[in-house]
Amino acid sequence: MTSIFQICSPVWLRRGVRATVVAMACAVATPALVLAQGVTATLDNAASTERLISEFGGWIGNRHDADQLVTTLRSGRPTATEGAASKEPATGPLGYGEVRLALKLAQGALAQQGVAYPNPDQLQAALHGGVLRTPQGEQVMDGVLPQKARGTGWANMAERYGLTMEDLLPPPGKAVTVKSAKQSAAKGKAKAGAKAKASAKASSKGKAKASAKKPAAKSAKPAAKVVKKATSGK
């Protein structure tokens, strides 16, 4: 059925109205879509950062320093006032996989020099280059990041530092699951109920055993003495 709008309105006006409606719909939907994509990317980034911190935090020293260093390598900008995170990476920003390779290669380079757990200056020398000071003496380090910036491949550096390709593979990760507060509360109640049920069952079983061990009462007087003795705690 033809509407009065279609009869009375010129073609160009009807097209303009449709275009305006479409534009308004896009304007409303686009921010929501961008926001959803941003939240997903943030969750992915947080999970990837957490995996790197878990793997290298103990080697670097602590979670805070590991977080700063990962952020520096990811962003290409210093995030600290001293140590490896205080220098701009020669490579510019790195992906999460590249950050892991850089740290793994720095680990191998330091291990060759007998350094198992580096201090901030030693880690800086391994990543950015410079003089590495150890109890055995000083060694000039080329730095993993400057080498990569000059075009040296990860595999070539791995061979130089005595690492195999298997050494460079990431450890198996675990899926990140996000539970709502409602789910967590329900799970907590279920656990509490199960514990209470198990406790009641154990208590009932204990009473049954105690009853089975008691000798048959010969008279009312001995039975009374047993009850008095149990309640007195003697």
Image (cartoon, grey):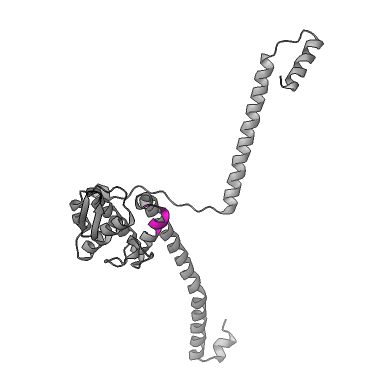
Q: Which residues are magenta?
A: 61-67
| Residue 206 horizontal side relative to residue 57, left or right | right
Q: Nearer the viewer, residue 97 or 59?
A: 59
Q: Is residue 222 magenta?
A: no
Q: Please report the residue visible at 60 percent of the width from the left and 42 percent of the height from the top.
A: 190
Vertical side of 63 occupied by 200: above or below: above
**Residue 107 picture location, percent across and down:** 28, 51
Relative height, residue 20 to residue 232 (above, below): below
Identified at 59% across, 87% down, the residue is: 4
Predominant secondary structure in magenta? helix
Q: Which residue corresponds to the image point at 72% horizontal and 22% vertical from the top-left?
A: 233
Q: Nearer the viewer, residue 225 or 65?
A: 65
Q: Is residue 185 visible?
A: yes
Task: Point out the image quarter for the N terminus.
Answer: bottom right
Q: Residue furthest right?
A: 220
In this orientation, does residue 163 appear? no
Where is residue 207? Give x, y as percent.
68, 22
Residue 186's spot in the image, x, y percent?
A: 60, 47
Residue at 52% in and 85% down:
17
- Residue 208 drawn above or below residue 18: above
Q: Is residue 64 magenta?
A: yes
Q: Is residue 111 left or right of residue 12?
A: left
Which quadrant: the C terminus?
Answer: top right
Name the foreground residue: 40 vs 216. Answer: 216
Residue 174: percent from left, percent from top = 41, 48
Quarter residue 153 falls in: bottom left
Q: Is residue 46 above or below residue 195?
A: below
| Number of callouts | 0
